[in-house]
Image (tube, rainbow, N blue to C red):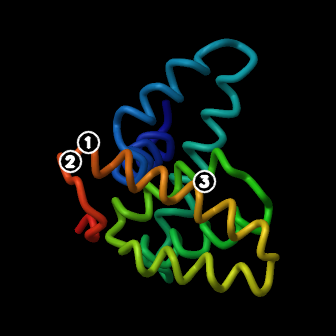
Amino acid sequence: MTDKFDAGLQVRREVLGDEYVDNSLNNNRDEFAWPMQELVTEYCWGDIWNREGLSRQQRSLINLAMLTALNRPHEIKVHVRGAINNGLTKEEIREVFMQTAIYCGVPAAIDSFRIAKAVFAEMDAENGVDDDKPLA
């Protein structure tokens, strides 16, 4: 492992959580998939997420908008949780999806709303919350 991998792994864990990262790494530790894990960890998380100029909150907002535009439901789910971990509120996430409805299409934004609501419910259940209050 390189220093860049280690730095990326730390950010990846802080944003996405240990459980998700461990599952991702362990499920892709074969000859075929491991190079992609190295690439994502070193360059996405090690280089880009560690750059100055944008906060983690801003990066999360951008990711949610781009992933909605690209119609990537699995990644939206992962990054909604990451956005909450980075300190964004449900309201801020909602506003990103409202913005994407106009520029990316209502169907794409509706899918992102559905995914986000499911993630919020999962996180509320994990935290013993049974209402619709912000997670912060």
Are dots 1 and 2 in contact, CB under 8 Å?
A: yes
Task: Kindly identify the amino acid type of the residue bearing the numbered disc 3.
Answer: Cys
How far from the left and from the top, in percent, is residue 23?
47, 25
Return the residue at label 3: 44
How far from the left and from the top, in percent, is residue 90?
40, 72
**In the depicted structure, whether residue 136 falls above or below residue 27:** below
The kind of secondary structure element at disc 1 is helix
Task: Kindly identify the amino acid type of the residue bearing the numbered disc 2.
Answer: Asn
Are dots 3 and 1 in contact, CB under 8 Å?
A: no
Viewer-proximal residue among 119 and 51: 119
Q: Residues within 10 Å of mark 3 (few under 14, many from 20)?
A: some
Residue depicted at 42% across the width and 80% down the height? 91
Which of the two discs, 3 and 2, labels the residue nearer the N terminus?
Answer: 3
- 132 lies left or right of 129: right
Residue depicted at 48% across the width and 58% down the height? 117
Residue depicted at 46% across the width and 64% down the height? 50
Return the residue at label 1: 126
- Please tell me in which quadrant of the rendered image residue 18 appears: top left
**In the depicted structure, whether residue 72 falls above or below residue 61:** above
How far from the left and from the top, in percent, is residue 48?
57, 63
- 97 lies left or right of 92: right
How far from the left and from the top, in percent, is residue 11?
40, 52
Residue depicted at 54% across the width and 75% down the height? 61
Which label number is shown at residue 90? Answer: none
Q: CA distance from mark 3 to mark 1?
A: 28 Å
Return the residue at label 2: 127
Task: Kindly identify the amino acid type of the residue bearing the numbered disc 1.
Answer: Glu
Which of the two discs, 3 and 1, labels the residue nearer the N terminus?
Answer: 3
Viewer-proximal residue among 47 and 80: 80
